[in-house]
Image (spheres, grey):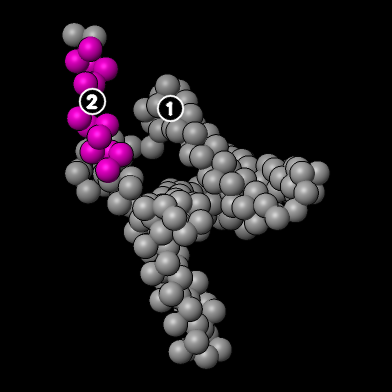
Amino acid sequence: VWHKLSGQHDDDKPAVEKGPEAEKKIVSGAVRTDLILSAEIMVIALATVSHQGFWSQMASLVVVAFVITLLVYGVVALLVKMDDIGLKLAQRSNSAIQALGRSLVTAMPKVLATISVVGTVAMLWVGGHILMANLGADGTGWFNAPYAWVHHVEHDIAEATGALGGLLGWSFNTLCSAVIGLLVGSVVVGALHLLPSKKAQNA
């Protein structure tokens, strides 16, 4: 978000045109992002089964971990290789398959750009929700006021809007969580920019 707002984003050329080092850097960043999201999902899963016994909690987390690995990373792996699949299809003799392959290759930059935006929003939402719920749920922390206010408004929305109340209330909670994630993330980014850079240290 900071790079987008400040205009300090990297060259827009695809990684494959920049060389293998750039592609490795992008893959490394994707792995770190997926690791953070996976940890957030595990924390949410643990909070959901926190009232159960130790073995039930462990079994639930193992199941969630396998589901994350098979589904999330399976989809990520498929997306990463989709342009290669499209290139292979474009080299086939069948014209329809060739057209499909070219469509996949053409669509992938737009698909990845969309996933980048959706993934950023998801990280802000999930991270903000973890902060709000875990720091304020006990009713004693400094985060209790935002937590109590959000859940009070969510409850009022759910009661006032009838059949769509649950969805609208959840949407409000999600929006507040994303705003909290953005605010906390902005503080972290600001603090990191105050620290001496590695280049300055090496100079």
Which of these two is toward me, 135 or 127?
135
Q: In this view, does 71 lie to the left or right of 83?
A: right
> Is disc 1 placed on a helix, strand or loop?
helix
Which of these two is toward me, 127 or 17?
127
Q: What stretch of residues is rendered in magenta?
A: 187-201
**Where does label 1 land, which residue?**
25
Q: Quadrant of the C terminus?
A: top left
Q: Residues within 10 Å of mark 1 (few under 14, many from 20)?
A: few
Marks 1/2: CA–CA distance: 23 Å
**Total of numbered circles in the picture?**
2
**Magenta-drawn stretch contains 190:** yes
Task: From the top left corner, tell me how far across and down residue 181 is, in percent.
Answer: 38, 52
The amino acid type of the residue labelled 2 equals Leu
Task: From the top left corner, tell me how far across and down residue 32 is, in percent.
Answer: 49, 34
Q: Main secondary structure of the magenta part?
A: helix
Q: From where the camera sits, is residue 132 visible? A: no
**Where does label 2 land, which residue?**
195
The amino acid type of the residue labelled 1 equals Lys
Residue at 50% from the left image edge and 52% from the top image edge: 134
